[in-house]
Amino acid sequence: MSRMLASLSAVAALMGGTAMADAPNVVADIAPVHSLVARVMEGVGTPDLILPPGASPHEYNLRPSEAGALQDADVVVWMGPRLAPWMEGAVETLAGDGGVLTLLEADETKLLDFRQNALFEKHSHGHGEEHGEDEHDHEEHAEGDHDHEAEHDQEEHAEGEHAHDDGHDHEEHAAHNDHDHAHGKYDAHAWLSPENASAWLNLIAAELSSADPENAGTYFANAAAGREELKALQSEVNAILDPVRGGSFILFHDAFQYFEVDFDFAASGAISLSDAQDPGPARIAEIQTRVRGEGIDCVLAEPQFNPGLVATVLDGTEAKTGVIDALGIDLEPGSSLYPQLIRNIATTLADCL
């Protein structure tokens, strides 16, 4: 991929920033990814968004128009089967002739292991790895904070225990057609890391340039500008969070650790382990104990989940609450959605704390 990026960058330098051809048909799965693709495509065209605002990325039935967009796609950019298992078959069968960029499988993507426990230890964020590395047994694992042989989503719980050996050979995983289990080791919410988003901009530019070399100059120029914008965004977010550093918060579910790691602002726990599973009474009681006993400042709800569970956790405490959104449900799709999404997360945290 590095050699490809270098050669395409050279083409881009020769061609300048002027769009010279019709836009390719490009499809993205979720709104944050669509936003990054739209930023790279500015001045050339607009990508199609598969998942409408408010829909779950974990379970969805394609509408005919969305299936048609995949079938006509020259390029598909999506997170991968760990986030959207329902989409893999559609990508394979409908978009067979187009280029496919699977972001969670890219070597440049920083991946984090799931946090298994309801309560997070202070050092539990220190184990982010580049995707291409094979070693994940760091000191954090030796201290017993994570049980990575446990199952991490609703389907895995229902089907029983499965061994997760090393989780790195994606071709082997695809051959076994065991996507829920093979990809279950990693937290799939990797778009909430602006560092990942910055790396993806260049990958998107390379994929688009491969399908549409005449517009390579525009794609790489846009990607470079987008990376500079993300640097400024990170500085802005740190300025928002600095006055409330040291505050403690609980999430509704464990989806935001990529944001936490990038900005060194760790959560104290999560009410629910997964997107698809309500927490049991024991987990709620564990969270309640920490909120009451440790003076947790803030418990964050999410727009698509049961607000009654947050109210239960808050009962008898002085903690504040807010609504935090990982997908940009209320934002207008487009190139500005991603930075606004990250900015909104920071603002919600600061306001709640």
Image (cartoon, helix red, strand yellow):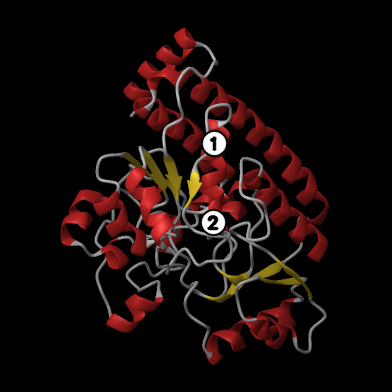
Q: Amino acid at mark 1?
A: Ser
Depth-wise, is mark 1 or mark 2 nearer the camera? Answer: 1
Q: Position of residue 90 (x, y in %)?
A: 30, 57
Query: Does residue 11 appear left or right of residue 283 in this picture?
Result: left
Q: Earlier in the sequence, mark 1 or mark 2?
A: 2
Q: Position of residue 39 (x, y in %)?
A: 58, 35
- 132, above or below 241, in the image: above
Q: Amino acid at mark 2?
A: His
Quadrant of the rendered image containing residue 316: bottom right
Residue occupying image coordinates x 72% and y 66%: 248
User: Which labelled disc corresponds to residue 198?
Assistant: 1
Residue occupying image coordinates x 63% and y 56%: 328
Residue occupying image coordinates x 54% and y 36%: 198
Residue occupying image coordinates x 28% and y 56%: 167
Query: Does residue 237 appear left or right of residue 87 in this picture?
Result: right
Between 265 and 85, the one nearer to me in the picture: 85
- 234, above or below 163, in the image: above
Labelled pair 1, 2 in contact (Cβ < 8 Å): no
